[in-house]
Image: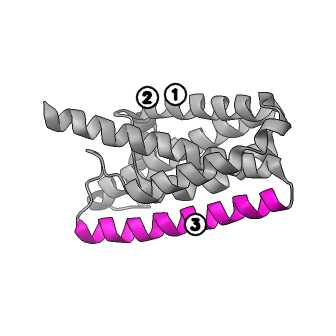
Amino acid sequence: MFSRASESLTKRLVKKDIIKMEDYEIYQFGIENFIMKACHIISYLIIGILFGLLPELMVFLAAFIPLRENSGGYHAKTPIKCYILSCSTVVTIMCLIRFISESKMQYSIFMALIVSLILFLIVPVDTDNKHLDDSEMAYYKNKARFIIIIELGMILIFRMLLWNYISFILSLSLTYEMIIALAGIYIKSKRQDS
């Protein structure tokens, strides 16, 4: 689906002499990734609007995306599986935000502390899709740990201000990244065992 659209668009760009044929693969890859990310974001926004939680979704994504990009973890094998899993995740997050009482949200600080410690110890997690050499591991480890510290600091500040709702949403971003990272470690270990 994404590759056909990107191939068609890239062929048109070559026909109109906007790009050169020798750059076809680079542009096709870039366009495919752009289309894929645009579909993800548009779908997330629609989900956020349907739940009536668009600002909350934006807070979650603002915390989650940088953490995800630098921490690694499980990656779906195909773009369509990635899309379905990502949208399912957003629906789950929206349900948690909608249905967990605010009185219970105050305890998210404990969840955030435990999850942050686990993440601090295990990130980055490379996968079959993205192998990291030693220098990349060190780079992503430092960057991911910095993001974890910043997000944990924000969670603590919002908790002290008694803004449990925001603190809870930020805690969810850390928790979901921990689940993805642990899933990546588990799948990698199963492949190595077989």
Q: Is residue 186 above or below residue 116?
A: above
**Badge 3 local density, few (<14 within 10 Å), some, or many (20+)?**
some
Give the Cα separation between the discs numbered 3 and 2. Answer: 31 Å
Q: Quadrant of residue 79?
A: top left
The reply to whether residue 16 is in sight is: no
Q: Position of residue 130 (x, y in %)?
A: 30, 52
Q: Amino acid at mark 2?
A: Lys
Q: Position of residue 45 (x, y in %)?
A: 71, 40
Q: Amino acid at mark 1?
A: Ile
Q: Is residue 44 above or below residue 88?
A: below
**Which quadrant, please, contains the N terminus?**
top left
Give the Cα separation between the discs numbered 1 and 2. Answer: 5 Å
The reply to whether residue 19 is in sight is: yes
Of labels 3 and 1, the one closer to you = 3
**Residue pointed to by mark 2:** 81
The circle on residue 149 is: 3
Q: Amino acid at mark 3?
A: Ile
Q: Position of residue 190 (x, y in %)?
A: 22, 33
Which range of residues does the magenta coloring cover? 134-160
Of labels 3 and 2, the one closer to you = 3
Which residue sits at x=86%, y=61%?
161
**Residue pointed to by mark 1:** 84
Q: Is residue 156 magenta?
A: yes
Q: State if disc 2 and disc 1 touch (CB < 8 Å).
A: yes
Viewer-nearest residue: 33 or 55 = 55
